[in-house]
Structures are given as C-alpha cells and as structure tokens.
Amino acid sequence: MKYDQLIIYYFSGTGNARSAAIWIEKIAKQEGLKTHIINIDRFKTVDIPELTGKTLIGFCSPTHGFNMPPIVLKFLSKFPKAKNVDIFILNTRAGIKLYKLYLPGLSGVAQLLPALILRLKGFRIVGMQPLDLPSNWLFLHPGLKEKVVNSIYERCLGIVNNFATNILQGKRKYKALLSLPFDLVLIPISFGYYFFGRFFLAKTLVATDACNNCNLCVSKCPVEAIKTVDDRLFWTYKCESCMRCINTCPQRAIDTAHGFSGLIVVIVYVLIIPFLIFILKKFDILDVEKQSKLFEHGWHLITTAIFILLVFLSYRVLHFLMKYKIVNRIITYSSLSKYKFWRRYKPPEY
Ligand SMILES: Cc1cc2nc3c(=O)[nH]c(=O)nc-3n(C[C@H](O)[C@H](O)[C@H](O)COP(=O)(O)O)c2cc1C
C-alpha cells in the first residue's frame, strides 16, 4: 500500500456519505492502515490528527443543489494549507433506479469547487469519485422503496470498494471528470441554488400538530438550525435542507409544506409581479416589457428579491398562525409529505 494512514472527513444528512466513508475506512483497515473517520457536524474547529508517515485525506459529502453543502465548503475553506498531501473527494448524489436501470445524479460543481479550493491550498488530488446512492430529496419526491434502496446500496458498495482499493494502492481515479460537460453547464444553477436552497427550500419545513416536542431533530441537526420559538419548531436560515430532521422524526411530525410553498410562488409571480408591472406602466414610470436584455437580468434580481422577502415574512407569519389548529390542519393536509405514500428515506445498515 502507498499510505500508512487514512483520515476521512465526512458530512452526511441522512447517512449515505457516512456509509461511503465507513466502506472506505473498512478497506483501509483491512490493508493495515491507521484510520481516522471524522464527522464534521457542528464543527467549530478543524481537527487534524497527527500526520504520521504517508497520509491520505478524504472528504465525503452529499451533493446539494449541484454543489457541496455550505457546511462542507466552510470546512474546506478553514482547512489548513499543506504541500503535496494526497486527497480524494467523494460526493454522493441522487441515485435512482427505474426498472433495471440505475440513473445517476448530477454533480455540478460539487467536485470541481472543493478540488479547486484544496488544490489552491497545496493538496494533490488523487481521486474524484461521484457515488449515486439513493436520493433523499424529500421535498421533490417520496423516499425510495426499501428494495430499490438496498439494490442501489449493493451496487455502490462495489463501486466504492473498487475506488478505495485503487487509490490506496496509489492509482489515480477521476471518475467525476467523465460528466464534466454537464457539470460545466450546471455552474450557474449551482450558484443560484446556493441562495435559493437556503432562502426558500429551508423555509418549507414545518412541525405539525403531531410533534410531541421530543427535540430529537433539534439535537440531531448538523448545523443547529432548528430552534424552539413559542413552543414550536422554527427552521432558521442556517438550515442546509439536508433532510435529516424530516427523515428521522419518530412521529412523522415534520413536513415540507408544499401547499404553502406553492401559494407563495403563485402570490409573487401571478399577483404581485404582474401588478407591479401594471402599476409601473400605468403611471408611466417604466414599461418593463420594452426594456433591454440587460434590464431583464436586473428585473429578475428584483423579482427574486421580492420572492425571498415574501418567503421571509410569510414563514414568520405562518409560524405564528400554526398555533391555531385550523391553520395547522390546512398546512399539514396540503403537504404531500403528510400522506403515507410519501415515504421517508432510511439508508440500510451496512
Ligand atoms: C436539498 C438537496 C439537494 C440535492 N441536490 C442534489 C443535486 O444537485 N444533485 C444530485 O445528484 N443529488 C442531489 N441531492 C441528493 C443527495 O445528494 C443524495 O441523496 C445524497 O446521497 C444524500 O447523502 P446523505 O445521505 O449523506 O445526506 C440533493 C438532496 C437534497 C436534500
């Protein structure tokens, strides 16, 4: 083996990236390497075990919005510089299985940005591996069926074992670069999502009447984003939408408020914006439709700002109104995740 020691840092919302980190650690242990596996949940400082002998450092994380989650980017930006230390990056993505076909997720800059940050810090990148573990994105779709999850897991275990064996032997593996053309196209969306995820998606999580204040979600949240305000749970802007809370709540009391989110979109884009355009035109202030391409971009920024402001205000109002049973019921039953078919995501124990 080329290395004496392996250090893996991981962040994992619902367990996929953690599984990948454990699988790699297992192979390293079998090969007699000294291993350290470090969860970066709620990190305050970057802890680095003593670099003895030849060390390989790995980073495992889910992909969020075609990028690494903000907590990981923050961690990497604080990671100290080092000359010529080997590293690898593994991003878990939204794997799906349709009949017998395994469909991959999309990385965007989830590999490229960390690779750039670490390269600029002096590290040598020896492995870039995407891993299509089951999608956990419960805002968009129900959790995958257990049989599908198990099948995707089994396939990924083989991929990880192969990747780990190769890089531990000193071979370089850059599977992530195969999707480079797609990833480059996704760059604008990945940066847009960085704000959209935090300012909108995170504001779709609510606790329903089924919540018994066990506070498991508060204690498990990797970024301490869930607070108790007026005896009810409130998701702050720290939320990464990692889906840990909704997937692990023992009461199924956390929902993504689809009805409420849809209503906000309709209010902003069907009522407020057209009304604003109408007023500006009527009082001869500005004819939005007749402006230049450049103005169009500026106008998008303005409408996005209006949208974010409304989400900010309405989430607070909603939080206040949820104490009334009738509002709580309406929000709960207009959320798809309330219904039984909207399964929660649970990774298998491996
Ligand atoms: C908010 C959010 C955004 C996501 N964005 C992407 C994405 O851009 N591309 C992708 O392939 N998967 C995406 N996913 C799926 C996860 O990356 C994937 O399910 C991952 O394996 C979860 O890992 P974890 O269990 O360690 O959190 C997203 C999931 C969530 C919750």
Image (cartoon, rainbow, N blue to C red):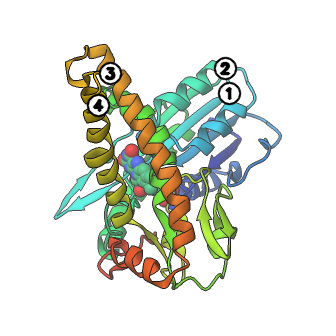
- Residue 22: x and y in percent read 58, 58
Mark 1 vs mark 4, CA separation in Å: 29 Å
Q: Quadrant of the N terminus?
A: top right
* Left/right of residue 43 with respect to residue 108 in the rendered view: right
Could you tell me the amino acid type at mark 3? Ile
The residue pinned by badge 2 equals: 122
* Left/right of residue 141 with respect to residue 289 in the rendered view: right
- Give the mark nearest the N terminus, 1 or 2: 1
Could you tell me the amino acid type at mark 2? Gly
- Give the mark nearest the N terminus, 4 or 3: 4
Q: Secondary structure at mark 3?
A: loop
Residue extending furthest right? 50
The residue pinned by badge 3 equals: 285
Mark 1 or 4: the one toward you: 4
Q: Are marks 1 and 2 in contact (CB under 8 Å)?
A: yes
Q: Are marks 4 and 3 in contact (CB under 8 Å)?
A: no
